Image (cartoon, rainbow, N blue to C red):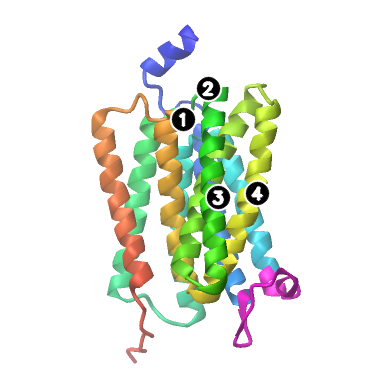
Amino acid sequence: MLTGGVALAKGLGVFSSTHWFGIPIALVGAVFLALGTICQGRGVESDGEQETSFRALVRRPVWLVGTGLIGAAIVLQLTALRFSPLMVVQPIGASALVVTAVANGAHSHRLPGKRESLSIILCILGIGAFVALAALSAQDIQVDERHLLTVLLLMACAIVAAFVVWVLTRRHPSAAAATAGAGVLYGFVATLAKAVIGRIVQGDFEWLALTGLAGLGIALALGASLVQKAHASGSDELVVAGLTVIDPMVAVTLAITVLGEAANAPSLAFVGFVAAGAAAVAGVWIMSVHKPETSRDPN
C-alpha cells in the first residue's frame, strides 16, 4: 500500500505504461457504435413502418447487422477499460456522433453546413482536449469492495428509475426520455464494468463481482430496449447525441466521485475538464437540434 501511495503521489501519467492502448481501441469502438446505431435506426423504421418488437426486429437483416456492430463496440470498450482509466475511455464515445453525422451526410449525398461543421469541430476539440487532460492526470485505482458495492447500489437505483421511464414511454413515446434513460444506464454499465475488470485483474473475483456481472446484463438489456423506443420516435442524431453526452457525463462523474480516478489531478486540470466538456456538449447540442439542409451543387 505504501509503494502504491508513493507512486500515485508522484503523479505518474497514464502514458507511463501501456495505458495509452485504450485510446485507439475506444476510437474504433466509437465508430462501430455509430454505424451500429444507424443500422438499428433503419431497422426499426423500415418500409415506412416503425417496429420495436424484438420478434419482428430479428427478422430484419439491417437491424441484426447494427446489433452485431454495437456488440462489437461494447467488447472494444471493455477492452479499452482494461488498459485505460474510465475518465479517458468514456468521453471518446462522443466521437460516435461525428461519425453518425458524416455517415448520414454521405448517405444522403450532401455536404455539412456551417453550423454542422462548427458542431463537429467543437466535438473533436472538446473530446480531444478532455481525453488528453484525463490521460495526463487520471490514474487507475485499486478497486476494493467499497467501490464495487457503491456502484452496485447506485446502479440499482438507476435501473429502477429507467424501468419507470420504460413503462411511461410505452403509452407516451418520448425519444428524449428513452435516450436519457439509456444514457444513464450505459454510464453505470461502463463504471461497473471498469470496477469488475479491476477486481478480476487484481485477482479478487468473488460473489460481489458476480453480482456486478448480473447487474451489467440487466442494465444492458433495459438500456437496449430504451434505445429501440428512442429510435421509433426520434432521429439517429438525437439518439446518438443523447447517449454520447449523458453516458460519458454519468461515467466521468462516477469515476471522479466514487472511483477516485482524479484524486491526484491538479486543480487547474478540473478547469480544463469543465471547459473541454462544455465545448463537446455545445457541439453535440448544436448537432442534435440543427436540421441539416440538402447541399446544392455549386455547378
Q: Which residue in the protein does label 2 denote?
A: 142
Q: Which mark is residue 160?
A: 3
Q: Residue at x 28, y 34 (%)?
A: 269
Q: Callout 2: few (<14), some (14-19), or many (20+) C-alpha neighbours within 10 Å?
A: some
Mark 1 is on which residue type? Leu
* Furthest residue in direction bottom, as rendered: 299
Query: In whole angstroms, how far apart are the C-alphas of marks 4 and 2?
Result: 26 Å
Helix, strand or loop at label 1? It is helix
Helix, strand or loop at label 3? It is helix
Mark positioned earlier in the residue sequence (4 or 2): 2
Q: Which mark is residue 259?
A: 1
Query: In whole angstroms, how far apart are the C-alphas of marks 1 and 4?
Result: 22 Å
Labels 1 & 3 near each other (Cβ < 8 A):
no
**Region rendered in magenta:** 44-63
Mark 3 is on which residue type? Val
Q: Residue at x 52, y 66 (%)?
A: 168
